[in-house]
Image (cartoon, rainbow, N blue to C red):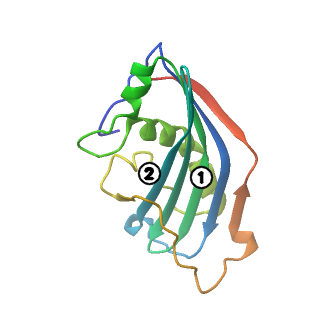
């Protein structure tokens, strides 16, 4: 994966809990090589107590041409000393993306991959935040409604809390 490497750290634990995962197939194309991904990201600090920081996150990913839309949201809990926590909150000067955002996306990517497989749609790349193929837009904005609603059989939704394996990284 290009860009910034995330090195493991014994002093920091990052847990990612997915609370909302949705995918919608909105169109067809036979040439996935022409599909580009736009990503909108929202991350907010929810609570900070001692050596524990809780952040909420939401990724909205759409394709151009319009083939599929994905949305994933939840929370991440960072456990560790404040200096290690602050280090993962720092913004990479080259990409303007905080390290923690890369870490969260790495954890939710597997779910996006499975969801896109169920929908028979192109999958966002694992390095979407590292590449110029995806464009970040902050803050998140609502996309205009599609004139025709997708069919129920073209949708997959998971809304139960799901904890993705906890890993130690820095």
- Residue at 62%, 50% (x, y): give it: 114
- The one nearer the camera, 19 or 158, is 19
Give the number of callouts: 2
Q: Mark 2 or mark 1: which is in front?
A: 1
| N-term-proximal mark, 2 vs 1 | 1
- Residue 31: percent from left, percent from top: 44, 70
**Is residue 50 placed above or below 73 in the rendered structure?**
above
The residue pinned by badge 1 equals 72
**Is residue 89 placed above or below 73 in the rendered structure?**
above
Residue that lies at the very extreme toward the top in this rendered image: 10
Q: Is disc 1 surrounded by few (<14), some (14 to 19) or many (20+) residues within 10 Å?
A: many
Element type at marker 2? loop
- Residue 159: percent from left, percent from top: 73, 52
Give left or right: position of 87 versus 20.
Answer: left
Residues under numbered marks 2 and 1 in contact, where contact means CB atoms less than 8 Å apart: no
The residue pinned by badge 2 equals 125
- Residue at 40%, 58% (x, y): give it: 138
Numbered label attached to residue 116:
none
Element type at marker 1? strand
Residue that lies at the very extreme toward the left in this rendered image: 94
Residue that lies at the very extreme toward the bottom in this rendered image: 147
- Residue 39: percent from left, percent from top: 44, 58
The quarter of the picture where the N terminus appears is top left
Q: CA distance from mark 2 to mark 1?
A: 15 Å
- Residue at 56%, 76% (x, y): give it: 27
């Amino acid at each position: 994966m290009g860009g910034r490497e995330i090195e493991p750290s014994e002093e920091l634990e990052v847990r990612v809990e997915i609370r909302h995962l949705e995918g919608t197939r909105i169109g067809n194309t036979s040439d996935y090589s022409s599909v580009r991904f736009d990503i909108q990201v929202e991350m907010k600090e929810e609570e900070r107590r001692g050596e524990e920081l809780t952040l909420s996150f939401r990724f909205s990913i759409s394709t151009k041409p319009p083939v599929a839309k994905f949305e994933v949201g939840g929370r991440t809990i960072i456990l560790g000393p404040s200096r290690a926590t602050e280090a993962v909150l720092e913004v990479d000067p080259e990409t303007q993306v905080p390290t923690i955002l890369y870490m969260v996306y790495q954890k939710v990517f597997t779910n996006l991959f499975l969801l896109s497989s169920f929908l028979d749609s192109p999958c966002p790349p694992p390095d979407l935040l590292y590449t110029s193929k995806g464009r970040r837009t902050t803050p998140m904005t609502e996309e205009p409604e599609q004139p025709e609603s997708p069919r129920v059989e073209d949708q997959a939704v998971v809304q139960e809390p799901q904890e993705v394996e906890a890993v130690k990284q820095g």
